[in-house]
Amino acid sequence: MSLLKVIVLAVVQGLAELLPVSSSAHVIVAEKLMGLDPSAPQMTLLLVMLHTGTMFAVIAYFWKTWKESYFASKAVFQRFAVRVIWATLLTGLIGEGIKKILEKTLLDGAPKTEIEQLFSHLELIAPALAAVGILILVAGLIEHRQRSAGPNAISSTQAGEHNVSMREAAWMGVVQGLALPFRGFSRSGSTISIGMLTGAAKEDAERFSFALAVVLTPAVVGLEALRLWKAAHLPASAAAAPVDLHGSLLSSLLGMVFSFFSGLLALQWLSRWLETGRWYLFGIYCLAASVIVYALHARGF
């Protein structure tokens, strides 16, 4: 794959990952338009390495805020850690459960089937975008109504502490699990929206959502690196196409760097939109994007 294609995908990922519009859907559509196979091991590794770049952008952008919110004292950090672990456990249970069900149903349970084989199916990405669009739209409209009603909006923030509650963390963990196997169902959009709908302050839901992403990303990167390594060592007769292990890793590392910088830009934009009460517009965008994605599917992409 050429360096130009890697840069294009990295910029798309960086801008879309930190906006609640499903970066995976945008990257997969870009790959399709460039004639690439989104389900190939080298492409799924590139995708998660692009996620890694944006993960570092999240750490750089939120670090000062996290220090003030989650590391203010030992007790505050312990409460935060318990909530992150609780949410991540639920994510793993839900995500892995759905993955197994899909592999045994949509993929017919055939030997060596993997959920990644569905990543190139735009007809599945379109409804996922529509679903998260509706969720974002509902959360945004409710938030907009509360903002219009006055400054006394209900918030889970207590005495300057920005931890979400165990209930809010649980819902965010469950919804994050739903986002793992379904490309198009934006992880950040769905988790922030469900946090808002279950009572969390919008800014607290945003901070906690991206903290969950930082915890989850290394495990996903490890799984995709293992998948690529296995594909590279398949016998020639068993492999669908030769895998250039070193070239794939180099492309993925370069993509990670570019996605880091574009991710920083996206975070600044996202925070401004959150502050001005225009969250619902991301829902409208996702609904429009779902129509475009389905139209591309209908045209044979």
Image (tube, helix red, strand yellow):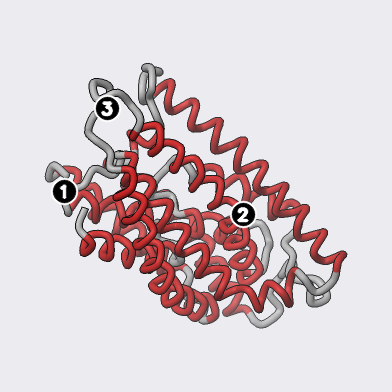
Q: Could you tell me residue 169's position as x and y percent?
A: 69, 53
Tell me which residue sits at (61%, 54%) in the image: 215
Pointer 1 or 2: first along the chain: 1
The residue labelled by disc 1 is 35
* Labelled pair 1, 2 in contact (Cβ < 8 Å): no
- The amino acid type of the residue labelled 2 equals Val
Q: Could you tell me residue 61's position as x and y percent?
A: 55, 75
Q: Could you tell me residue 71's position as x and y percent?
A: 77, 70
Quarter occupied by the C terminus: top left
Pointer 3 or 1: first along the chain: 1
Residue 271 visible to the viewer: yes
* Labelled pair 2, 3 in contact (Cβ < 8 Å): no
In this rendering, the label closer to the viewer, 2 or 3: 3
Number of residues whose C-alpha sits closer than 10 Å to that of mark 2, classed few (under 14), some (14–19) or many (20 or more): some
Based on the displayed image, in which of its 4 quarters is residue 109 positioned? Answer: top left
Residue placed most toward the observer, 118 or 145: 118
Q: Which label sits on residue 215?
A: 2
The residue labelled by disc 3 is 239
- How far apart marks 2 and 3 lie (CA) works out to 32 Å
Viewed as shown, does residue 138 lie left or right of 291? Answer: right
- The amino acid type of the residue labelled 3 equals Ala
